[in-house]
Image: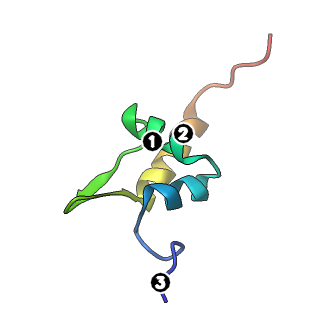
Amino acid sequence: MTTADNRIVLTIEEAAHRLGIGRTTMYALIKNGEIRTVTIGRLRRIPVGCLDEYVSNLLDQPLNPAA
């Protein structure tokens, strides 16, 4: 049986679940170019490496302390 944990590409919903965010937020991140996707036939998928890249970029951003 194949699970989302061992695949190299995920559906939008699976990727959102993996990040702990909603589907609408995931679509917004994709639209803004913050998370890259690939098209396989007519399907849009998110490589697991692109999720890792997104989180890594978040970690590289400077912290904005509350004023």
- Badge 2 marks a residue whose secondary structure is helix
Total numbered labels:
3
Sequence-first tag of 3 and 1: 3
Three-letter code for the amino acid on which mark 3 is drawn: Thr
Determine whether 4 is above or below 36 in the image: below
- Badge 3 marks a residue whose secondary structure is loop
Crowd band around label 2 with a 10 angstrom C-alpha radius: few (<14), some (14–19), many (20+): few
Gap in angstroms between the C-alphas marked 3 and 1: 24 Å
Q: Nearer the viewer, residue 41 or 7?
A: 41
Residues tagged 3 and 2 counted as in contact (Cβ below 8 A): no
Residues tagged 1 and 2 counted as in contact (Cβ below 8 A): yes
Residue underneath mark 2: 25
Marker disc for residue 42: none
Residue underneath mark 3: 2
Asked which quadrant contains residue 47, the reply is: bottom left
Q: Residue 63 in the image: x percent, y percent? A: 68, 25
Tell me which residue sits at (46%, 37%) in the image. Answer: 29
Crowd band around label 1 with a 10 angstrom C-alpha radius: few (<14), some (14–19), many (20+): some
Tell me which residue sits at (46%, 48%) in the image. Answer: 53
Sequence-first tag of 3 and 2: 3
Gap in angstroms between the C-alphas marked 3 and 2: 26 Å
